[in-house]
Amino acid sequence: MKRLTLESFLKQSHPSAMQKVFLVLSMSLPAILAQLTSIAMQYIDAGMVGSLGAAATGAIGLVSSTTWLMNGMCVGMSSGFSVQVAQLVGAGRKSEAADVLRQALKILFCCSFLLMVFCISISCGLPVFLGADEAIREDASRYFFIYACGLPFAQIRQLSAAMMQCSGDMKTPSVLAGMVCVLDVIFNYFLIFPTRTVAAAGLELTVFGAGLGVEGAALGTALSEVVIGLLMLYFTAIRSPILNLRRKGDWKLKKKTVVTAVKIAVPMTLDHIFLCSAYVAGTLLIAPLGTVAVAANSLAVTAESLCYMPGYGIGSASTAIIGQTLGAERLDLTRSFSRLTVLLGMVLMGFTGMIMFGIAPVVFQFLTTDSTVASLGTQMLRIELFAEPLYGASICCAGVFRGAGDTLFPSIMNLVSMWGVRILLAFFLIPVLGLKGYWIAMTVELCFRGLIFLFRLKYGRWMKRVL
């Protein structure tokens, strides 16, 4: 079958169903592979830090929810501008799309710089606020300080990736996203460990190492963000055929562009805050159950991440597709692609859930040597896997709504679902059923979330342009 781009699709009157499926899968695959690389590298990264001992792992784990929140804020701010680019490209207004990128670079660099200053200012007090053991406070503080210094480059990476995806280029940002993880591991290899002798092919080689421990892990992450952030910017602003900033354009801020970005970005940023706070609340509910329960819960969440790769890949593709079809005023394609992407996400995540159900014991043997933790984690994960199709529906619907600039109502739905269903139900079930109660609450909540997102997809008034 001849390869079709999103731009060529918009020129066709009646593309076939098979062509639509091929387009969605071809745009989703790079993002899925990038997530696969990211997860694999996270496993390796965790193992490298874990070799330093429980204190090092605890120091980084302590501030992980805060770093997730900061990254989420960067994603939310980027979406405020990238959705406008998708709709402008679909409408054939490419020069205006490049001007939106110009404005985004000015505003978000300033915002990320202020965010960096704020994070640096709280880096000393954060471990104390989070109730850290005194033994890990200093390492946790240094890790977060170094992480904060790289935030402007993390923002540039997120913005550039979102801009390329929404202009129709899924491959380049996906490849570079995978490189972030690879570079992180390479930098960690030389920065975490001291100079040492390594045996290879019968030879003993001296490998340089800075021996910085936890600080080395933070530097590895920050340096990878710097390198890939600059590369992302280069491919977006110089190499992109649509967003190339070497062409003549306007760098002045425009009220309509900024106001639209705020309307899209603020709900998404609040959404990340709601989700992160709910995860923290869940951890607080589980903590009294003991070390085995906490470890099993953490590893089960890690194992489950392999299941939702297809959903997030298709969700990223659907944002670009919906944005451009709406911009081109092809409501017929918007409607059909919204249903197709969600259906594909549900089917693929249901399939990965079935596979994980069978291989879960093997996965946990790789993640831990503690048979008790592995057994409990396997049981918990298998409870939640029945919700994968509806979880996929919520992920892909969110991508569809994001492409239309509809972020406020989905954020409210996430808030109600996470706090009104998962946390509330877990509060009552955990005292009776233990960890099993939390995972039952999670399963019920994911099904509920998927159903309300599907309801909005079918009956809600989300299909409108923001420009």
Image (tube, grey):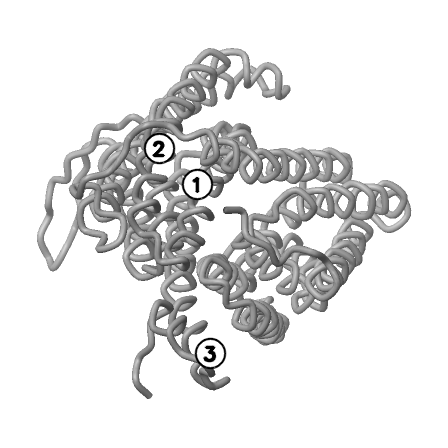
Q: Amino acid at mark 3?
A: Lys
**Which one is earlier in the sequence, the residue at label 2 or at label 3?**
3
Q: In the structure shown, which secondary structural element does the residue marked by tag 1 occupy? A: helix
Does 98 sit left or right of 462 as displayed? Answer: left
Q: Who's the residue at 42% across and 48% down the image?
A: 42
Residue at which label 2 appears: 103
Considering only vertical position in the picture, is 304 above or below 59? below
Mark 1–mark 2 CB contact (< 8 Å): yes
**Can you tell which mark lies on residue 20?**
3
Mark 3, secondary structure of its residue: helix
409, 269: nearer the viewer: 409
Q: Residue at x 60, y 38 (%)?
A: 272
- Packing grade of label 3 (10 A; few <14, some 14-19, many >=20) is some
Q: Amino acid at mark 2?
A: Gln
- Residue 358 is at least partly visible in this image: no
- Report, in whole angstroms, how far the alpha carbon at label 2 lies from the one at label 3: 33 Å
Residue 341's x, y, as percent?
Answer: 55, 70
147 left or right of 209?
right
The image quadrant that residue 449 belongs to is bottom right
Q: Position of residue 388 (x, y in %)?
A: 66, 66
Where residue 427 sits: x, y (%)? Answer: 85, 40
Which residue in the structure is indicated by mark 1? 81
Mark number, residue 155? none
Q: Residue 191, image x and y in percent?
A: 25, 32
Q: Residues within 10 Å of mark 2 (few under 14, many from 20)?
A: some
